[in-house]
Image: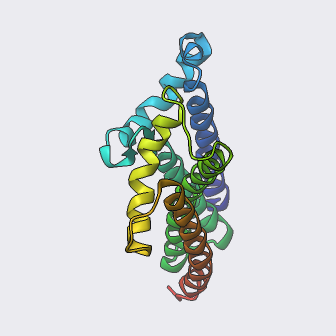
Amino acid sequence: MLYFLFTFLAAVLNLYSIVCMVAIFMSWAPGLKFTSFGRFMTGVTDPYLRIFSRMRFLTIGCVDFSPIIGIGILSLLSSILSRIANTGRIYFGGILASIVYMIWNLFSTIVGIFALFIFIRWIVLLVNHGQTPYNSAWNQIDQFLQKISYKISKIISRKPVKYQTSLLISWITGAVLFACGTILIDRLLILCSRIPF
């Protein structure tokens, strides 16, 4: 009986996270929000997603990471419920492993998004010989990326570097952090799963 209850609850959370993702994608085309389907979707998802959008620290520059956190928490709860359904018991090690895994997934997703933007921007600067037209959309992205890339390059290199070099340093640093983090998290998950209670 409990197996079916926890499996059902996990499935409901998975379905709701898919609905939230569809609503987020629909928000990229503002006209869709005003259709009857769009109003239904926002009515179902906005009360939950607004909880996270109120947290100002989740917005960096013009990028809002609150939907990623909201969907990550739904995924975490679904994972915990599925683990309980499959093992038939609630144990601290399994819950801790799920939390660590969710935090790592959120962190690696954010680092991956930054790395992708940084790499694309570096390639564009390389192709354009470091030049950016004044009215280019890249100027908005540069305002966001410069803060991060210059901070990272200051940690790695004591000398001031060009923007293009700081992007490359940031991308390499992100790749190294991701590789080391993956190894560390795998070991940590094994330790969490060995907790007997």
Tell me residue 103's x, y (percent): 49, 64
Determine the residue positioned at 59% across, 68% down: 172
Determine the residue positioned at 56% across, 32% down: 24
- Furthest toward the top, the residue is 35
User: In the figure, 105 relative to 26: above or below?
Assistant: below
Of the pair 12 and 88, the residue shown nearer to us? 12
92 relative position to 15: left or right: left
Determine the residue positioned at 44% across, 66% down: 153
Q: Quadrant of residue 150?
A: bottom left
68 relative position to 32: left or right: left
User: In the figure, 158 relative to 66: above or below?
Assistant: below
* Tally of numbered tags: 0
Which color scheme does this rendered protein use?
A: rainbow
Determine the residue positioned at 51% across, 77% down: 91
Of the pair 84 and 39, the residue shown nearer to us? 39
Tell me residue 184's x, y (percent): 56, 82
Tell me residue 20's x, y (percent): 56, 36
User: In the figure, 5 relative to 85: above or below?
Assistant: above
